[in-house]
Image: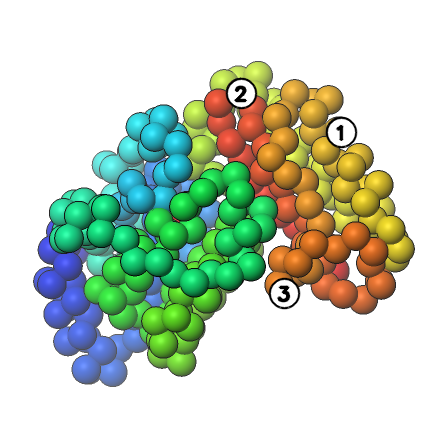
């Protein structure tokens, strides 16, 4: 695996390979890698000639500075894991390399309704920060395929919108890969490393709640099911930001289901200081 720290070097290397007809698959990450990330790397390996990963803990997407400070960094382990998974190129930029005009020089991305839902109100500015960093990464890597995890369901929609805003949606195909789970159902996440033993025991309640929704949803009023999900999570010890059922294509809220509309159930909830998110397609 070749390590790059300079955007220009990586840009030129990939452009050179693409001129030779090679396809590049890109997996952007913030490090603290786990099997979920590696599944994206392996998928990229199956579908491209060149697998590119970036590790950059992006300061502009953290609305809570304490969350940024505590974000786990496991770089040596990450490099070993990426090498084992067959990654070819790793981009490890500095903040100055990613934000040459400084992190305050912000462009506004028109995400419309998407930014007003779910994560939006709880993490003001978060998706603007995601767009800033992914915009820059996509300009540097200019991948043929971009690999994202379904665990960040709303982020997948935001990045799809970003590629439209950038006008590259016909050049870069977004590939959304399934969430990987621990044997007890907990969605793999870098944040799981921050859970205490007791919190780790409680964390799979999120998945069990999502499964309950999936197994019990019926056409008609679904607000009772949604309210039960909030109550079950609170009883287990979570502080719930949201437990919602939404249209899987638009994220519009759904209160009365016609039995056909594609749905997704989404949860964001804290166990003490650690915020976990998960989702499940219902149909
Ligand atoms: O999902 C993540 O790890 C981050 O939001 C991303 C896409 C790498 C941007 O910093």
Q: Give the CA distance from mark 3 to mark 1.
A: 26 Å
Q: Residues within 10 Å of mark 1 (few under 14, many from 20)?
A: some
Give the residue displayed 46% in from the left and 66% down from the top: 160
Q: Does residue 184 show up?
A: no
| Circle on res. 249 | 3
Left or right: 34 with respect to 2?
Answer: right
Of the pair 178 and 99, the residue shown nearer to us: 99
Q: Which colouring convention does the figure follow?
A: rainbow
Q: Give the CA distance from mark 2 to mark 3.
A: 32 Å
Mark 2 — residue?
272
Residue 99 point in image, percent of width and height: 19, 51
Left or right: 268 with respect to 163?
Answer: right
Circle 2/circle 3 CB separation < 8 Å? no
92 lies above or below 148: above
Residue 221 point in image, percent of width and height: 87, 51
Of the pair 24 and 173, the residue shown nearer to us: 173
| Circle on res. 161 | none
The quarter of the picture where residue 135 lies is bottom left
Mark 1 — residue?
231
Of the pair 105 and 70, the residue shown nearer to us: 105
Q: Residues within 10 Å of mark 3 (few under 14, many from 20)?
A: few
Q: Helix, strand, or loop for circle 2?
A: loop
């Amino acid at each position: 695996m070749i390590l790059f720290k300079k955007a220009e070097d990586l840009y030129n290397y990939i452009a050179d390979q693409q001129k030779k007809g090679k396809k590049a698959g890109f997996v952007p990450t913030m490090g603290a890698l786990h099997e979920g990330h590696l599944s994206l790397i392996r998928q990229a390996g199956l579908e491209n000639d060149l697998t590119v990963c970036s590790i950059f803990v992006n300061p502009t997407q953290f609305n809570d500075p304490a969350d940024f400070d505590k974000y786990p960094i496991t770089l040596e382990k990450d490099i070993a894991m990426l090498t084992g998974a067959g990654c070819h190129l790793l981009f490890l930029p500095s903040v100055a390399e990613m934000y040459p005009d400084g992190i305050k020089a912000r462009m506004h991305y028109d995400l419309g309704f998407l930014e007003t839902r779910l994560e939006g109100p709880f993490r003001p500015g978060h998706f603007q920060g995601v767009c800033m960093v992914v915009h820059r990464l996509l300009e540097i890597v200019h991948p043929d395929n971009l690999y994202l995890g379904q665990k960040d369901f709303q982020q997948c929609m935001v990045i799809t919108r970003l590629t439209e805003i950038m006008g590259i949606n016909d050049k870069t195909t977004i590939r959304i890969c399934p969430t990987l789970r621990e044997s007890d159902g907990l969605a793999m996440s870098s944040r799981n490393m921050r859970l205490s033993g007791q919190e780790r025991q409680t964390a799979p309640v999120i998945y069990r709640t999502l499964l309950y929704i999936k197994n019990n949803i019926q056409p008609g009023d679904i607000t009772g099911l949604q309210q039960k999900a909030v109550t079950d999570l609170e009883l287990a010890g979570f502080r719930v930001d949201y437990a919602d059922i939404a249209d899987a294509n638009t994220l519009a809220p759904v209160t009365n289901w016609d039995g056909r509309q594609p749905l997704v159930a989404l949860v964001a909830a804290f166990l003490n200081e650690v915020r976990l998110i998960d989702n499940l397609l219902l149909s």
